Structures are given as C-alpha cells and as structure tokens.
Image: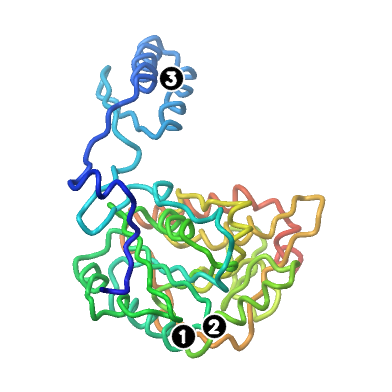
Amino acid sequence: MASALEVKDSRAARYPWPVTSRPIPAAVLDAAHARRLARQAGDWEEADRLRALIEAAGWKVIDHGVDFALRPAHPSDVITEHGVRYGASERVPARLDEPADRLATVIARATDHPTELARLLNGLRRTAPAGTQVIVVADAPSDVQAAALKDPAGPAATPIAGAPVEVVWMASRVGQAAALNAGIRRAVGGVVIVLDESVELLGDTVSPLVRVLEDPSVAVAGGWGSMSRDARRFTAAEPGDVDVIDGACLAFRRADYTARGPLDEHFRQPRGLDAWWSLVLRDEGPERPPRRAVCLADLPITRREPGAGAPVGPDEAREVKRNSYRVSDRFGGRRDLLSGAGRS
C-alpha cells in the first residue's frame, strides 16, 4: 500500500461519483429576490446588505440586467474512488482540536513545479527529525505535478520521519492562503512550518525553528526577514529581530493559528500574505508590546529560485497590488509593529 495519504471521509463511501451541484437554500434565494427588488427601487444600501448576507451564506450573486443567478462561492467537493477533492479549505476535516502530539507540521503547497517539490520532500526525508508531520496541499496541480504526487514510487509516497506524507487535494486552484488553511487544518504538530517549493534544505531546519518558538516572546520565525516603515515597502533585514518573516520559510505555533487564524483567503498570491500573517501573529494590541519576529542566523536552508511565485500576468499583478493594500491598510499606522518606522 502506498504510504502517501489522501484525506478521506465517509462521503466517499456514500457518494462514489462527483458532486457537482448544490441546492440553493430557501433563505439565500429569498434574499436574492429581495435584493433584485431593492436594486429596481434604487435602494443600493439594502442591496449591498443583502449581497453580504448571501455571500456570508457561501453563495455569489451574479447580476444579469434585472435578473440574477446564484452559484456557490466555492466549487463543490468532488468525491472519487481515491478520496475527496475539496472545494474549499473549510471543508477539509480539521484536527486542530486534537492534542498537538507531534514536534512540528511542515506544510507545502503543490501547483506546477514537480521537480522543486520533489527536492523539498527529499530534503525533509534526509533532515527532518522524528516527530515531524509533512502535509502537501495539492492545489489543483498541473497534470505532471498530480502524476508525481500519485506515483507509488514518487517522493510523496515514501515516509518522512517515519510517517506517511499526507496529501490534501483541492478541487480547483484556491490560492496561497486557502491552500495553507487547508493544510493547517490537518496539523497535529505544536509548531507549523510553511516551506516554499523554491527552498532547499541543507540540514535539520525543523529543530531550530521549534526551539526559538519555545520563547513565549517570539511569535514567528524563519529563514529570511524584512523591515518596513509603512507596511507597504519592505526591505530585507539581517538575522535577528525583524518586522516580518518571508513566507518561503515561516514558522509559528499551531495554538496561535487557532487563536488568530485562519489566513485571509483574499491572499491568493503569496506576496503580502507572509507580511500580513507575521504582523497578525505579533500584534498584541496598541497598548501592549508586540511579540517578536526572529530571523535565524545560520539556518541550514537556501533558496534555489529566489522570486518563485512572482506574478506572471496582469491578473496576478493586480492581486499582488491588492495584497499590498490589505497589509498597509491594516498595519500602516502601527509604528509599534514597524521597527523600520523609527530608522533613518
């Protein structure tokens, strides 16, 4: 039996065919009809309120002139003979209420780079200490990447630190934050470590990150960090205390995720998510000193492909720009969190 695991649930036995449609709840349909009347009357405030109710219920309303259509905000789960492909992160069965009985959980997102992901997994296989759980989120990967993940002789099929690699499959490309949320929901390690496909492990990276997070004053740690004056422009910083940790290697406590998460799934692109989450983790409120972000010196890790995950088209570029606004709008005025604000 292959050692790579797909998350399964009881629906696979009950529904051995793809689930492609969902009935529209009566309350959602009623709200949509009421919104159409509000729009016809020019009551845009009421129309916006009803749209928010519809979206909060997990649906999107698409206007077609005076008519409308409703569709799920997320694709439906797809049930196959191999397991479930999840339409949204919140549908992944969560283990966050279970005791943290592993040293750490490493999360990696798989999209279109099978060679890089194999390098990362093989590096973990060589260096990860006992008690490391590894989860790969297959975010609607390319055919080549999907085949590599399913290969019974592939890097995801061989145990790491004595335990199988768990593969969580998404039904469509959900983006960086949602994919990480999906993986973290399966975490049973006391520390969660997000690693990008672009990094190469030269030694045990897990243990130093776990050790630094034993200090309660530290909220987030990793291999690269940066400073900012305004939460919009970030400058690479030397090892030590920094403002934010780079998402290529970013570690935090599972308990903090439970208390302060989930990640904002508007962050479909990686850029900006690391800064936002670092500051969320550090923020103790304006009346209390923030917790620390620590960039570790001599962490045995390198980035083989700096800039992996950069935008490749106008749509991605717009998403990255919106990410920047999300960070600066929330934290731009928080000089207590921005060490760069007081530097010349």
**Up-down: is 327 above or below 163?**
above
Inspect the image, locate mark 2, and give the three-letter code of the amino acid beneath it. Thr
Position of residue 70 measured from the top left corner of the image (x, y, whole percent): 29, 28
For residue 118, side relative to residue 332 (left or right): left
Give the amino acid at mark 3.
Ala
Q: Which mark is residue 205?
A: 2
Q: Which mark is residue 47?
A: 3
Q: Nearer the viewer, residue 72 or 13?
A: 13
Q: Give the residue drawn at x 46%, y 24%.
A: 48
Which three-letter amino acid code belongs to the residue tagged 1? Leu
Question: Looking at the picture, how far across and down is residue 27, in whole percent?
Answer: 39, 20
**Separation of residues labelled 1 and 3 (CA atoms):** 52 Å
As measured in the structure, the alpha-carbon distance from the residue carrying label 2 to the one carrying label 1 is 7 Å
Residue designated by label 1:
201
Image coordinates for residue 5, horizontal then vertical, percent: 33, 67
Of the two numbered discs 2 and 3 in the rendering, the one whose residue sits closer to the viewer:
2
For the C terminus, the image quarter is bottom right
Report helix, strand or loop for mark 3. helix
